[in-house]
Image (tube, rainbow, N blue to C red):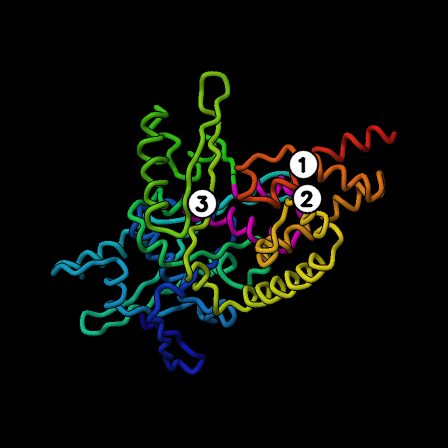
Amino acid sequence: MPIITEKQNNQKQVLTLNDLEKRKVVEHNSLITSIAKMDKTPLKMFELAVSCIDTENPPKDNTVYLSKTDLFAFFKVSDNDKHSRFKQAVEKMQKQAFFQIKEEQGKGFKFKSIVPIPYVEWTDYNDEVKIEFHREIMPYLINLKKNFTQHALSDIAELNSKYSIILYRWLSMNYNQYEHYSNKGGRRVEQVEAYRNPTISMEELRIMTDTVNEYKDFRNFEKRILKNSIEEITEHTSFNVTYDKIKKGRSIDSIVFHITKKRRADDNSYKLEDKTYKEVKIEKEQSEAILVKQAMESKYTRLLLENFLLSPYEMTDTTLMAGLQKNVYPKYDELKTLRGLEGVKKHLSYVREKQEPYSKGNIAKYLKKAIEQYLPTVKRQEL
């Protein structure tokens, strides 16, 4: 997909973006949680245009250039009426489409309404389309150091509902934070897990999806907004998503989503050109290597082997060993301080005796849960 940017000398530079899988959309979280007052087509066109921005070298004139051919291909439009439909979509985007953004400021909130793309230019004899972003939307798209989300454009391309796109962006925002804090730390375990299982009140969900005055019967809302969107997201994106309804009295008060990432080789292909992602990936690999080495040399690994809680085969799993060293062995150190090494041995013997077959599939999680439940009891007894 060729995309053209404009240099200061007004010469247009063509960037080849043939692989849609590698395109990413980077947006500030305030934009993700804003109210998108637009339907599916303008929203997808906006996402496509945002993916054209080089975040490390953003356009100084807020302008990107798209190919009409590739624009039609992105939307999978091939009929003879596509040019007039494109014109109608552009007109609708400029006259009706805008973001309502709510930000904390001082003692209250600041509200903004921004038409993201006020200027689009094209001809009937040329393939290029000039798209100019509004200056007020640019701070939400470039020079983002924190509170931002990036997701794959290829996921957006397959979504056919405005609500699916809105929910996908919000779920991506939460899952991005789950991945970030899982790798970098800085949050408690339950806080990290909350990003993978985010909760949103019905009031917030209705505001974000712009359905405050629509589908007032929850059964209709669930069918039209929730079920259809989640099914579409699970089918077409890198996420598997389910949800639970949380009641307050007789009414549905909130929704908790459960997000897992599909296992596939190109999961993060859209991030491969991202400098920050590369740095984090290298740092994570180096950190894991250190943890694995420490685990291999740890006396606790030997004790796990002696109690048949760990097998030599499992020791070849670097992720497992790094997880034990990072999340389990420090707890054993605490127990050793309180009860000595003999106390750790007795604990592991008891854990082995009570182990159920199902726990063998995730031994690190089982051991972590066991020691976390046991330590508070020991600490109370030591008082």
> Do labels 2 and 1 touch, CB within 8 Å?
yes
Residue 194 placed where, x, y %?
57, 40
Disc assigned to residue 351: 1
Q: Nearer the viewer, mark 2 or mark 1?
A: 2
Disc assigned to residue 307: 2
Which of pointers 2 and 3 lies earlier in the amino acid sequence?
Answer: 3
User: Which structural element holds mark 1?
Assistant: helix
Q: Nearer the viewer, mark 2 or mark 3?
A: 2
Disc assigned to residue 328: none
Q: Nearer the viewer, mark 3 or mark 1?
A: 1
What's the residue type where badge 3 is placed? Gln
Q: Which residues are magenta?
A: 167-196
Screen quadrant of the N terminus: bottom left
Q: Whole-Å distance between the Cαs marked 2 and 3?
A: 59 Å
Q: Residue at x 76, y 44 (%)?
A: 332
Circle 3 residue: 100
Q: Categorize mark 3 by other alpha carbons within 10 Å: few (<14), some (14-19), many (20+).
A: some
> Do labels 2 and 3 touch, CB within 8 Å?
no
Q: Residue furthest right?
A: 383
